[in-house]
Image: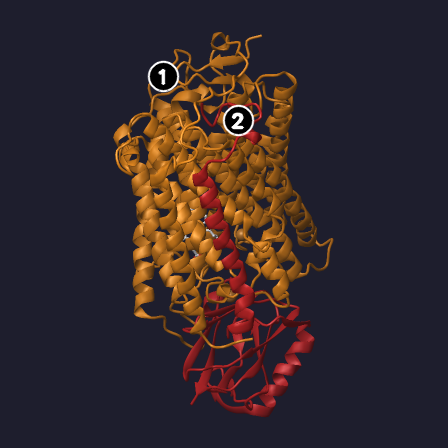
Chain colours: A red, B orange
Amino acid sequence: MTSYLPPAQRIWWKVPVGRQEIVWIAIALVWCLIMFFMMPYWHVYGKQNLSTEAYKTTPAQFGPKVQAMIDQYTVRHETEQQIPVVAPPAGSDIYMLGRLWQWWPILELEKGKTYRLHLSSMDWQHGFSLQPVNINMQVVPGYEMVLNITPDVAGEYGVVCNEYCGIGHHTMLGRIYVKE
Amino acid sequence: MGNFRLCPDSGLFFDKNAESLMKVNAVAAAVSLLVAGLLALGVALTRWPAVHLLPADQFYMYLTAHGVDALLFWIIFFEIAVLYFASSTLLRCRLAAPRWAWLGFALMVIGAITTNVAIFQGNSSVMMTSYVPMQAAPSFYLGLILFAVGALIGCFVFFGTLVIAKNENTYEGSIPLVTFGAMTAAIIAVFTIASGAIILVPTYLWSIGYIAHIDPSMYRIIWWAMGHSSQQINVVAHVSIWYLVGGLLLGARPMSEKVSRFAFLLYILFLQLASAHHILVDPGISAEWKIFNTSYAMYLAVLASLIHGLTVPGSMEVAQREKGYNRGMFEWLRKAPWGNPTFSSVAISIVIFGFIGGITGVVMGTEQINLIIHNTIYVPAHFHATVAVGTTLTFMGLTYLLIPVLFRRQMILPTLAKWQPYLFGAGMTILILFMMGAGTLGVSRRHWDMDFTGAALSFEYSGMAYTMMGIAGIGAVLAVIAGGAFLLITVGSLLVGKKLDASAGLLQSFGVPLAPEAYNAEPEILPMAAAVEEHGSAGFEAPGTFILAMLLLVSFVVYYFINWKYLSSVWPLS
Ligand code: HEM
Ligand SMILES: [Cu+2]
Ligand SMILES: [Cu+2]
């Protein structure tokens, strides 16, 4: 009378199911449905949804767009590497590129304003991990993801790379400033 | 004739070929686990910030090998043994095409060695996911392909054995539930290996220069069609073993054959594009596609696990109550054989798999919540709860059972064996909970240095994140010690354990059959389970389990909404 012997009833699929199981399956199914509806619900009422806007691109197309923004809006340089700090106007298209092993450039944004952030990789896959906010996205070469972000707390943020990208992966660290 | 041996202790019949193949697969699995565990120690001690053991290149090399050896080689070698057990042994049927089965085994061994050599040569530290366009040595992919072909042969040997058993009428009625579960696993395995071939063969050709370009986004979608479904195989395999162990140790029978089989079927039906939950934050994938493919509108694969979560312990409760452990809600549980390592392994595995692995998996597979979890160390925390406790600990428990039965050796160090599952469970739980915590604080997975030494800019994780990674390291050390204890007990038993049959020599432990005289049994047709009186189907047969299941559900609901709350606090984005 066990699970490793053939079922006791030849026509086991006609044996009625006990009440306990029926009750549990019903409760579990309701919960599963609630979990499903939470996702569309959040698209309507929630404020954190990932954009689905994306384009095919190449390093040769994406690189110059980033450079154009840097040329126009650089306000200063930081570190020995002279990384440009770029302060584009509120509401504009802003760019950040990932490459071995840098997030480029540093962005300076205004609190409460919305920007269209374009992300892409020049080489391998990278992971855009905004810390300590903890927003994480996959950055895939050949694709340009565009999302609207609204930084709502001022401060200095790190952009960690959280997709393994080779031996210098742990040095791939970018920055975003959010000003009052 | 003379192809079967009757195990006098368990009453199981072993076909000579199946027996040898089970042994060699189990031994290959144990070797893989040994390697994976040693590597885990290096990896975990590097992620422990105060220790930071290995240099970066070795860390990534070890991590790649740890993932491949643990998740693929240890688990799949063992699963092939389980498939042969569930078909040949449980159905008392000769194994189909034993030569093919040996070929499959040989391919798997060659594949596993090839990939390991590629990794340890140093140019293939690409992680087991090997996301393009990062490239490994061609032999890295080739080894994986050979291994997969070998495993596929194993699946077909399993199907062939089912057909023989049917044609030769070795059993009455329908196949047992455990065999049904194994069949589910094998069906999913065929789908998995097909997806694997679709992605790994072109990747291999790309690595040797025949193909110029592989789209990295497409790679992720198809790779995860393999990567995710292979995890579903593990779930099905360990749930089947839960049923088996309940039956063998407690005499449990399924509460309802129909419900349990239906739940297995749901895994097959609602699996297809479960890869979706691995690409929730990838560029350009529509929200509708993601929502639909992670849930099929009602999460029916999750429902299946919730069903087994009730029926596995429920069937044990019913069996215990029939033995008279009827007082209160939980006497049946208190009087369970907690000192038997097979039972305690399964019990711990059920709890950690359900309460941690299952809940975290659904939470982080929710479209929007994935934003705050993707690629943080929360992710390895989740899958150590599913595969390292759920699957691995269950397999360990089954191994304890098989040493006397299959290998005909008495287990050595019984006291250590009694404690081993608890130690492994405790170490793993510490590792898991604190990696979850650190992940919530943003700590990245697959990352050599949370101090970012050498970076142009700087960022500092909170002190709490460091503390959590440290405590996780302590848990890891405990788990590795417990893993070592498991291997010491099992390998030691094979080598020096007391022989239960005069002919059980050393070679016999490694795949050579017992002396020919042992194979003198002629199994009778496997009978149907004895019908039991219908009782209590109107009431609740397993009220204690129902309370535990409700506890699971409440934890699930609370934790789920906590994560939505946390999500609502991050920067608005659209
Ligand atoms: C013996 C105890 C174990 C310890 C201490 C351990 C520890 C770890 C740690 C610390 C990581 C790395 C996290 C990171 O930096 O991303 C990891 C990764 C991993 N572990 Fe384990 N683990 C153990 C056992 C297992 C087992 C039994 C399995 C599977 C059955 C497993 C499967 C994996 C996989 C698939 C990865 C991911 C590798 C990757 O990111 O590519 N581990 N483990
Ligand atoms: Cu990286
Ligand atoms: Cu998955």
Q: Name the residue under label 1.
A: B499
Residue B371, percent from left and from top: 50, 67
Residue B128 visible somewhere in the drawing: no
Q: Earlier in the sequence, mark 1 or mark 2?
A: 2
How crowded pointer 2 is (Cα within 10 Å; few <14, some 14-19, many 20+) is rated as many
Q: Name the residue under label 2.
A: B176
Residue at 40% in and 70% down: B453
Q: Which amino acid type corresponds to the residue marked 2 in the rendered image?
A: Pro
- Left or right side of A174 for B52: left
How crowded pointer 1 is (Cα within 10 Å; few <14, some 14-19, many 20+) is rated as some
Location of the N terminus of chain B by quadrant is: top right
Location of the C terminus of chain B by quadrant is: bottom right
Residues B134 and A21: in front is A21
Residues B461 and B391: in front is B391
Q: Which amino acid type corresponds to the residue marked 1 in the rendered image?
A: Lys
Q: In this view, does A34 lie above or below B267?
A: below
